[in-house]
Image (spheres, grey):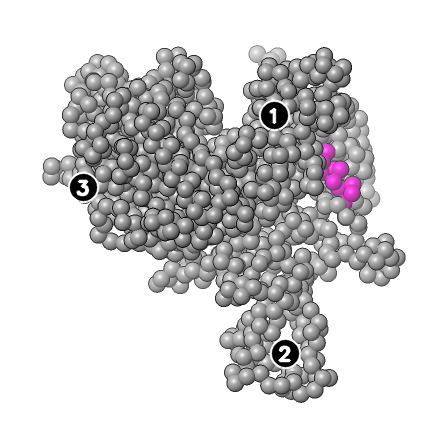
Amino acid sequence: MSLPRVNAVVIGAGAGGGVVAKELCEAGLRVALLERGRWYTANDCRKDDLRNQRTSVLGNNSGPDEERNPRVFVDRDANRHIVLPSEGGYSNNAACVGGGTLTYGAMAWRYQPKDFRMRSTYGTPEGSTLDDWPISYEDLAPFYEKAEYEIGVSGDVSNDPFKGPRAKPLPMPPLPPTREYEILRPAAQRLGLHPFDLPMLRNSVPYNGRPPCMRCRWCVGFVCEVDAKCGTHNTVIPRALATGLCDLRLGCMVKEILTTDQGKITSVSYFDAHDRLQEQPADLVIVSGAAIESARLLLNSKSKLFPNGLGNRFDWVGRNLQGHAYSGATGLFDFDTYDDVGPGACIAICDYNHGNPGLRGGAMLANEFIRLPYQAVDMPPNGVRWGKAHKDFMRKAYRRTIKIMGPTQEMPVFDSRVQLDPTVKDFWGMPVAQLSGYQHPHTLEIAGVMAAKAEAWLKEAGAIQTWRNLPGNGVSGGQHQAGTCRMGNDPKTSVVDSWCRVHDADNLYVIDGSVHVTNGGFNPALTILANAYRASARLVQFWKGKV
Amino acid sequence: MAKRSALTRRRFLQVAATAAASSALISCGRHAGPWRFFTPGEARTIEALCEQIIPADQDPGATWAGTIYYIDSQLVGHFRKLQSTYRSGSAACDAVCRAAHGQPFAELPFDQQTAFLQRLPNTLQPFFDMVITHTMQGFYGDARHDGNRDAVSWRMLGIPVIPIRGRDHYEFPGKG
Amino acid sequence: MAFLRSRLALLALAIGILIVLGLPAASLYYEYSAGESCARCHEIRSEHSSWQTSTHRAVACGACHGEILTFDPGFHLGNARRLVQHIRGAYRDPIRLRTLDVNAMVGRCQKCHQQEAAQWQNGPHGITYESVFLDQKHNRSRLLMDDCLRCHGMFFEGGIRNLVAPLNTEGPWKLLPASVVQQPVIPCLTCHAIHRSGDPLHKDNDNDSSAKSAGREELYRPSLGFFDRRERANFSVAFLPLPVMFDSGRPVKISPDPRQSLCYQCHGPLASMEVHSGDDRTPVGVHEGLSCLACHQKHGQHTRASCSTCHPRLSNCGLDVEKMDTTFASTKSPHNIHFVKCLDCHPKGIPKKRSASARSSSYR
C-alpha cells in the first residue's frame, strides 16, 4: 500500500537532512523527513557518564537501538566481529532527530582552501585515492556563512591567519576563557604560533531564541540541558516543521529506494515505528543517513538497472570510508589546570594544517573537551593500569593535565569501505553494513608529527611530563565518518556530481558527509551543514525548473 | 455500627488472604546475599580483585566504594553477554591460585594477591584486563552506577559531585 | 464451546478474586512485620537497611510510603506490576519514587513536622507547578527548558516537553499533566533525605540529647541534602560544594555554614563565580561573610526579625536599620540588602563610629 505522494523524501534528520528539509519546505515543497531514531531531549540523557555518545560502555544515549542494528567489523587480520552500536569498531554516530549534532562537541570549522585541492597541492600518495573536490572553498564560502548564521556559531577566528577568505565575522563572540586557555595561549605565542578562540556551534550569548552555554562539565556526548548547543534539532528542523509542509516521521527505518526499470526513482520503502512496511512515493529522494548508512542504503537498493546497488555502476559506493586519525599529546603540570568549566575545548591553532615539510596535510590542534573522571583512567603513560600506582597517578594528575588533540586529515583508501555483510541481517531482515580497511601509512606518519607538535606546545606551556596519543591503524569512521559517496565530475570515479546528485539517477541525491572527497584536518559538521545548504539551493532551483 | 462491622470484615478478608500470599513470597526471602549474579564465592574473588585494582590507602578503595555492585548489577544488565566469562574467569583464577598457593584468591594475604596478579598466567590475563576495565568504570564512574559510593572517587579527585551553576538572566530583545 | 466459555469465566473469576483479596493481603503481610518483610524483597534491601540507621528509623514504612490498608486499586496494581517485573527479572534498579509518591509524602511529613510544613508552604519555596511554569512574564521573555526542572519540579518524571506546551515565547501555555497543577515544585524531599543515617530529631526541650551532652552540637540535620535531578539522588550537604566567589576579581569571604551549599545549588552564580551573577545572592559589602541562614528562616525563608539578631535598634547614624533605604524595607530600593556597601549611603566617606557601645556587633 502506497502513501500519498510527496515532493521529496529526506532520509535521516541529522546535519545534512535537517538542513535539506528546511530549505525544501521553505521553498514550498512537501517533504517527508524519515528518521529511524527518536527525538531525544536532555531529560532522556541525564548526564550519564558511562552511557552517552562519547563513552558508551553502558550504551548510547541517542541511538541507534542497541538490539536492532548490528554491524560487522572486519579487523586487520580479516576476523569478522558482529558489533553492537555501543561497541568498539561499530563507528557509531547517532540515530535521532539532530543526528550527531544533538550531542556533538560542536566545533564549527570551515575547511581551508587547500583542503578542497589536496591532489593538486600534494599529489596522490601510492595506495590512496586522494583527490580534489569538484568544488572550491569559494563555492562553499557563502553557504558556510549561512550555516554559521542560521545554526549559530560563537568564537573568534580573526586571529587565524590560515583561514580562507570570509565576508563576515562569526555571529557570536567566544565564551570567556578557561584556565587551560590562559595557560596555552601565551605558550603558543612564544612558539610563534597563532592561537585563537575556536569556533563552536554553541550559543555564547542569547541567539536564535535560545540561551547561552552555562558551561557545565557534561558537553560532548550529551544533550544540552539549556539548549545552548546548536544542532539541526533546535534550529532548522523546527523551522521546517513550522512551514506545515514537513512531515517528520520517527522510528522509520528505510529498507530501500525503489526504481522503475527505466532507472527513475519512484519511492522509498520503509518500516514505520510499528515495523509495518510502508511505501512513500516521491519526486525527489535525498539520502542523508551519514557515510555508513547512506552507503548501505544505496547498496541495499538493488534493481534490474542497478544490480549492485544505486549509483554503484563503477563500484565506488561505500569506498574511501574515512574519519580522522586523532592524535595529540597529554601534559602533566605541577599546578592545577582543571577549572570545571565546560565545554573545555576553547583554543586552537591551524599552523600545522598545511605546509608541513614532506607531509600531505596535517591537523588543527586544540585542547580537549572537559573530561569526566572515567575518561581519564587510561591516562597514565607508563603502562600503569591498576593498583596503588594507578590510584596515585589519578590523584596526582586528574586536575593537572591538559590534553591537546587534532583530527589528522586522512589519505583516503579505496579498500577502506562499507559493504553489505553476506550473512548478518538487522532486525528488519536487511543486510547490515560491514566495515573493513585500514589507515594509509602516510596518515599515520602525519599523525605522528601532529602528536609531536602538540607535545611541544604542552612543554612550552610548562608541562613537567608529556606523552603522545597516537591513532591506531584500523579503518576510521566514527562520528566524523565521510567519503563513501564521493563527489566528482567523472561518473567512473565518483558517486555524486558536484551538486550531490547521484550520477545515474536524475532525482536521487546524497547530502551528508558521504560526499566529502577528503575530510579536512577539521571536525566536519559545519562543512556538512554548508554543503547541505549549497546542494539544497540547487535542488530548489532545479525543482522550480530554473536549471 | 454498620461501619464498624464493614471495617472488621475488610480486615478479616485481608488477614485471611495473607497466609496464601505470604507463602508464595517467602521463597524470595530465602535468596541469600545481596547479589544479582555472583555466587558468594565468586563475589569474594571479584571483590578481592577489585580491591587489588583500586586498593584503599588514605582514600577508600573499591571494596568500600562497592564497585562490585556495579559489576554485579551490570552482569544482569548491559554486560549479560559476559556472564559466562565472569563465571569461568573467577573459577579459573581460584583454581590457578589453589594450585599455586593452596587457597582461593580471596584467602591470600593482600601482598601475596598483588604478587600473584603481577605474574599472572597468560590464560588469566584477558579476564583480569576485563575486570580492570569494569572496576575503573564502577569506581570512577558516576555514583548513580552503584560502584562509587558517596561519589568517593570524585571527591578524592577534587571534583564537586554536583557543580554550582546559576543561569544567566537573559531576556530576548523585543519580548516581555 | 459453552463449556470452554464457562471455564474461561471461572478462570477470570479466580484471577479476579486473587487480585481483590490477594494483593491487599500481601500488602498487609508487609505492614505487620515492621519493615522486615519489605526487605525480603532484595530490590529494596538497601533502602530498608539504610532506613534502620536513619533519622526516621522510628517511623514505619507505611507512614511515609502510604498506608497499606487501602482499597485504592492503583496502589495494589502498582505492587502487582512490580511483582511481575520481579519474576520476569525485568526490574529496574534502584526503585525510584514517582512524582506522585513524592508529592503524596508532603502531607505525610506534615503530620509530624507541622510548623516546618506551614512555614514552607507560606514561603517562596512552597510554590506550585502552576505558579512557576505558567508565569506569563517569564514565559514571554525566556524559553522553558529541561534545565528549569533542576530547581523547579526536580521530581517530575519526564522532560519539559512533557510538562508545558507550547515551548515557545508566544503562549498561551498550559500544563500537560493536570495532576501536577497545584502540586509543589520544591517538595520536602528536595532538601531532605529521609533515609540518611543519623540520630532521630530530639525536641528542643529534650535536654538529655546524647549529642548535646557529648558536647557535639550538630551543625545541620543529617537529612539535609539536595536532590539532583540528573543523578536522581539526594546528595548530603557534606558532599555539596560551597563556592569560591569573587567580587570583580577580589575573593569574597564566605561563611563556612555548610547548610548554604543547599542554597547555592539553585541560587548559584555563573561559571565566572562573580557575586550577583546568575542567581547568586552571596552577601558582599556590609553583610559579607554572613550565612544565608543568618537572616533567612529555614523553611519559610522570611527575614522578619533578622536585623535585630545582630543590630542594635539604631545604627551609628541613629537610623533604624530596618527602615533604611534597602531592599529589606522595600523591594524597589536600589540598595540590595545582599550587596549594599557603606559607600552606597556614605558617598563622601564613612563617618567615625560615635561610641564603643553603639558599635554594631560583628557577630557572624
Badge 3: chain ID: A
Quadrant of image for the N terminus of chain C: top right
Judged left or right of residue A232, residue B90 is right
Q: Position of residue C170 (x, y in %)?
A: 38, 56
Say which quarter of the image contains residue C83.
top right
Give the percent coordinates (x, y) of residue C288.
61, 69
Amino acid marked by disc 2:
Glu
Picture residue at 22% right of the left edge, 22% below the top: A311
Residues at circles 3 and 1 in contact by the CB criterion of under 8 Å: no
Let me know if residue A18 is in the magenta part: no
Name the residue tied to disc 2: C322
Q: Locate residue A398 relative to residue B111 in the image: left or right.
A: left
Bounds of the magenta segment = C45-55
Foreground residue, C46 or A168? A168
> Where, quadrant-wise, is the C terminus of chain C in this rendering?
bottom right
Q: What residue does disc 1 label?
A: B131
Q: Residues within 10 Å of mark 2 (few under 14, many from 20)?
A: many
Instruction: Mark 3 vs mark 1: tell me if same chain.
Output: no
Give the quadrant of residue A221.
top left
Query: Dot 3: within a 10 Å radius of its alpha carbon, few (fewer than 14), some, or many (20 or more) residues?
Result: few
Which mark is nearer the camera, 3 or 1? 1
Residue closer to the observer: A470 or A476: A470
In the rendered image, the vertical position of residue B30 relative to residue A17, given as above or below = above
